[in-house]
Image (tube, helix red, strand yellow):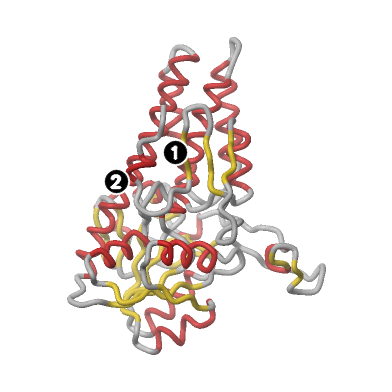
Amino acid sequence: MANSTDQRSMGTVAMRWHGDKLELLDQRLLPTDEHWITAEGASAVAQCITDMVVRGAPAIGISAAYGVALAARHAGGADWQGDVAQAIDTLAKSRPTAVNLFWALQRMERVLLACQSRDEAAEQLASEAVRIHEEDLAANLAMADHALDVMHPEQAISVLTHCNTGALATGGYGTALGVIRRLHERQLLENVFADETRPWLQGSRLTAWELARDEIPVTLNADGAAAAILASGKVKWVIVGADRITANGDVANKIGTYSLAVLARYHNVGFMVVAPSSTVDMALASGKDIPIEEREGTEIREIRGIPLAPAGVEVFNPVFDVTPASLIDAIVTEKGAVRNPDKAGMKSLFA
């Protein structure tokens, strides 16, 4: 079963489903090398997620769903359901923070439990994975419309974004970057300032590459330059994605997002979070409950093997931080927008 989203995606395609294998664009090598990795089983997909071959909360969830479908295809023997369940457990351990991963795996598990044979499971799980992929693309398009309803720009504006939230990080089009695409389509975008996003440099390697490839005006800046840019008055909105949103509207996103929210509030710049409803975790009361992934220090001490710091120096390397709801002007999902999010506003849209 070929993935119809290959033709319907807007922006760069980061994953290709072929029914018996999943191809993933190795985002660690961009922008200098466009290399595809082929995963033929769930363990290979899990390793790609752990190793950051694929990243971005929606893309992680979609990839994991395809991993479950591959597990069903290769499961054998009397305990084929056990084999698939073990694959789901392996995929669940690949990254701890992005709730989309667990949301997608739970959907796949429900389909698995309803299947009576291995052949039925292989077919139904593959269909469900494609459905998750297609739903994400549709959600991105809807979010772009909802976001413009919140922003209602009357003339072209400049925005600032952090990390990568485009077609590379989703099923196509993008979340925060999807809003930027829609502004550009409506001739309402003057410029995008893209934080470089240390330590993995998703902003410089991925966002700047993706926007330049699609001829969307972009200016790359060091993370530390964001304050000066906002102080200049050139930017009307900071637009970011999310890896998990809690019941009170707190948001976990790429490290550095919290400081942007503080800067935006100080400079009277709008701060918008754009993410699919699968990112909302109403089971968690606040951001204090979100598990924050920390990765090993080499990512800070080196870039592609080139030393940047003394060998062995202690490193603090959290992948995400939590932005309090009080600093957020709007959370936008495909279901609509929550302005000035709080527990009541979140409950009204997501209960």
Q: Is residue 326 visible?
A: no
Kindly indicate whether the residue at mark 2 contacts the one at mark 1 (C-beta within 8 angstroms). no
Q: Position of residue 144 (x, y in %)?
A: 27, 58
Q: Which residue is mark 2?
A: 138
Q: Label 1's element?
A: helix
Toward which corner of the image does residue 38 lie, by quadrant?
top right
Q: Is residue 233 visible?
A: yes
Question: Residue at position x 61%, y 35% from top?
Answer: 90
Q: Which mark is residue 104?
A: 1
Question: Residue at position x 43%, y 61% from top?
Answer: 251
Q: Nearer the viewer, residue 22 or 123?
A: 22
Q: Is residue 85 left or right of 180 when viewed as pictured?
A: right
Residue type at mark 1: give it: Ala
Q: Label 2's element?
A: helix
Residue that sits furthest to the top in the current view: 78
Question: Residue at position x 61%, y 56% from top?
Answer: 29
| 176 up-or-down from 142: above or below | below
Q: CA distance from mark 1 to mark 2?
A: 16 Å
First of labels 1, 2 by sequence position: 1
